[in-house]
Image: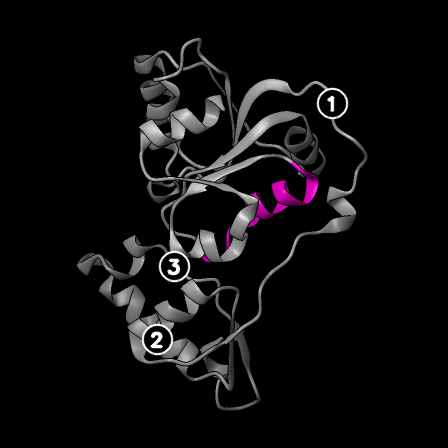
């Protein structure tokens, strides 16, 4: 709330914004409003160095990094299947920068085809159309926490092809339960996951990693 800044000590935890919200000239007003709001707070916390760099770039604003974490009580729900399901899992919003289109392009290179399970809010229409055109078998759903954990434990792997993340919770959750992870080769993902994931640059790389 803007009216609280300056009246009482305020702390903001800033998750960050996708590039479409602060690099697009059409979104210039949004970026300026957010920078003005957070600059009035007494302390700024961010979950990653990527968001820290974003604030510095947008307005020269300094913040402290306080990484987010996983909910161990939810994720520690018992063992998954010994023989994993032959399926790849995608857990994210269906926004363009999350990379589902790139994942579908990679899945289309696989023979035989591998089923893809997609869980997340957003407009499924364009991705359903793309999957049908490419001949990729896809199941769309929206898991609750219990279902998500079970899917993470039972799937052969999680692919997180996002080009931008404020933090990146799904791959961290997969790491916690021991599910193999493939992520886009970005500085933030490397900083977050280190040796705990496989990294790809394009659809060909991604397709090869899925078949390993």
- The residue beneath circle 2 is 56
Q: Secondary structure at mark 2?
A: helix
Residue drawn at (50%, 16%), measured in percent from left and top? 115
Of 198 and 113, the residue lying toward us: 198
Name above or below for residue 92 compared with residue 61: above
Residues shaded magenta: 166-178
Q: Report the residue marked by disc 3.
A: 17
| Image position of 150 (left or right of 191) | right
As measured in the structure, the alpha-carbon distance from the residue carrying label 2 to the one carrying label 1 is 45 Å
Question: Which numbered disc, 3 or 2, marks the residue that appears first in the sequence?
Answer: 3
User: What distance separates the C-alpha of mark 3 from that of mark 1?
Assistant: 36 Å
Q: Which mark is residue 81?
A: 1
Residue 197, image x, y percentages: 52, 42
User: Which secondary structure type mostly characterizes the magenta part of the structure?
Assistant: helix
Q: Secondary structure at mark 1?
A: loop
Q: Position of residue 140 (x, y in %)?
A: 50, 24
């Amino acid at each position: 709330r803007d009216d609280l800044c300056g009246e009482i000590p305020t702390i903001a935890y800033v998750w960050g914004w996708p590039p479409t919200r602060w690099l697009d000239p059409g979104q210039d007003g949004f970026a300026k409003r957010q920078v003005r709001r957070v600059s009035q707070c007494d302390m700024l916390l961010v979950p990653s160095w990527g968001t820290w760099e974003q604030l510095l770039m947008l307005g020269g604003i300094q913040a402290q990094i306080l990484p987010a974490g996983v909910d161990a009580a939810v994720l520690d729900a018992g063992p998954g299947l010994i023989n994993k399901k032959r399926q790849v899992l995608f857990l994210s919003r269906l926004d363009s920068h999350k990379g589902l289109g790139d994942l579908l392009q990679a899945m289309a290179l696989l023979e035989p085809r591998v089923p893809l399970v997609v869980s997340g809010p957003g407009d499924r229409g364009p991705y359903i159309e793309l999957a049908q055109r490419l001949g990729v078998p896809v199941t769309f759903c929206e898991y609750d926490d219990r279902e998500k954990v079970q899917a993470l434990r039972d799937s052969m792997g999680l692919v997180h092809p996002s080009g931008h993340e404020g933090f990146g919770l799904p791959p961290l959750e997969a790491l916690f339960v021991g599910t193999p992870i493939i992520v886009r080769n970005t500085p933030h993902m490397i900083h977050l996951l280190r040796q705990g994931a496989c990294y790809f640059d394009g659809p060909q790389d991604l397709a090869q990693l899925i078949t390993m």
